[in-house]
Image: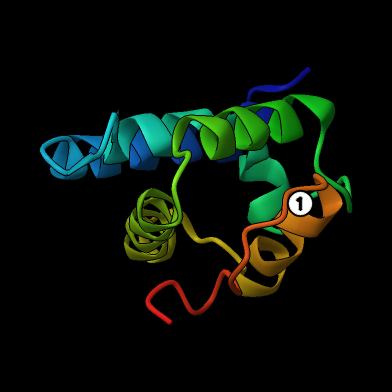
Amino acid sequence: MSGRNYVPLFVSVMVLCMVMTTLHASQIDDISCSEAISSLLPCLPFLEGSLPATPSSDCCTGATNLFNKANTIPARKSVCQCLQNASPKLWIHSERAKQLPKLCHINLFFPIDKCNS
C-alpha cells in the first residue's frame, strides 16, 4: 500500500485527537464526551462518506456500547449534543449520521439531528 492511502486516516485521527482534547472536560453522566467520540472511531469512514455505504460491525458495536452506557434519555441527548458539536471538526456527513442508528439497529427515541427536542 502506498503512503497516500494512509493520509485520510491519519488526518481523521489527528482531527479526532484535537477534538477529544478540546472536549475532554465535558462529562455526560458516566461517560465523557471524548469517550463518546472514541466509541465511534470505527464509524469515521462511514460517517465521512467513504466506502462502505453501510457501517462496519465494529462501528455498530461501538455505537451500541455507547448507547448502552448512556442509558437514560437525558444522557443520550447529552451524548448526541456532544457528537453534534464535534461533527463539523470531523467532517461528518449529516445524512450518514442520521442513518447510523437505524443501520445499527439502535432506537434513540428522538431524531439524531434534534438532540434537544
The residue closer to the viewer here, 51 or 27, is 27
Q: Is residue 91 left or right of residue 3?
A: left
Task: Tell me the quarter of the image containing the C terminus.
Answer: bottom left
Q: For numbered disc 1, what is the local secondary structure?
A: loop
Report the residue at 44% width, 39% height from top.
70
Query: Can you give x and y, in whole percent of width and height, for residue 97 in the image?
Result: 64, 62
Report the residue at 87% width, 49% height from top.
54
78 over 69 or under it: above or below: below
Q: Evaluate whether residue 57 shows in this view.
A: yes
Q: Evaluate whether residue 9 shows in this view.
A: no
Query: Can you give x and y, in whole percent of width and height, for residue 73 in the image?
Result: 45, 56
**Which residue reaches farthest left?**
25
Query: Can you give x and y, in whole percent of width and height, for residue 66 in the image?
Result: 53, 34
Q: Quadrant of residue 18?
A: top left
For badge 1, the amino acid type reads: Ser
Name the colour scheme.
rainbow
The residue closer to the viewer here, 17 or 27, is 27
Query: Can you give x and y, in whole percent of width and height, for residue 114 in the image?
Result: 49, 79
Report the residue at 41% width, 64% height from top.
84
Q: Quadrant of residue 2?
A: top right
